Amino acid sequence: MGEQVAFPALIKELNVKSLVTGDKEARLVLQFQPTDDLLDQINRLHRADELIMAAIVPIENNNHQRIAYNASTQRKKRQPQRPPEGNAQ
């Protein structure tokens, strides 16, 4: 089967809509950590309006990987600022 690419990713969204014809259409959004090599592989497979074969496979025993991935992809939340003590008006 020619070129292939596989990489760990999080499924962030799955949107399904019904078309006027009665068929359904879906859009799947993945979040992953790109490397130059991975992006190059994906770009070589991407051709506008051409289908690809997609497979989703769970990673066995990936609790450590999931925690590390989530920690590296989450934005840090801002801590609320407290007024300085002793400066009450």
Image (cartoon, rainbow, N blue to C red):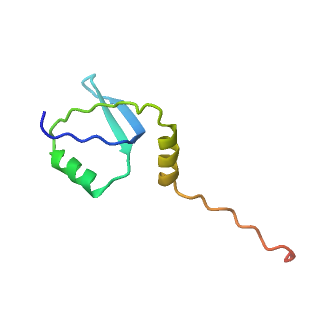
Looking at the picture, does residue 4 appear above or below residue 40?
Answer: above
**Residue 69 in the figure: left or right of residue 77:** left
Query: Percent x, y for residue 40?
Result: 21, 53
Q: Residue at x 23, y 48 (%)?
A: 42
Quadrant that contains the C terminus: bottom right
In this picture, residue 21 sits left or right of residue 14: left
| Of residues 33 and 65, the one drawn nearer to the viewer in this rendering | 65
Give the number of callouts.
0
Question: 36 or 87, which lies in front?
Answer: 36
Return the x and y of residue 1 as percentages of the image width and height: 13, 33
> Does residue 75 lie above or below 66 as drawn?
below
What residue is drawn where x is 47% and y is 32%?
A: 61
The extreme left residue here reads: 2
Looking at the image, which residue sits at the far top?
22
Q: Nearer the viewer, residue 10 or 85?
A: 10
Which residue is pictured at 75% across the width and 67% down the height?
82
Residue 3 lies in what quarter of the image? top left
Residue 25 place in picture, x, y as percent: 29, 30
Given residues 48 and 61, the one toward you in this image is 61
Above-or-below relation of 86 to 17: below
Seen in the image, is 39 located left or right of residue 10? left
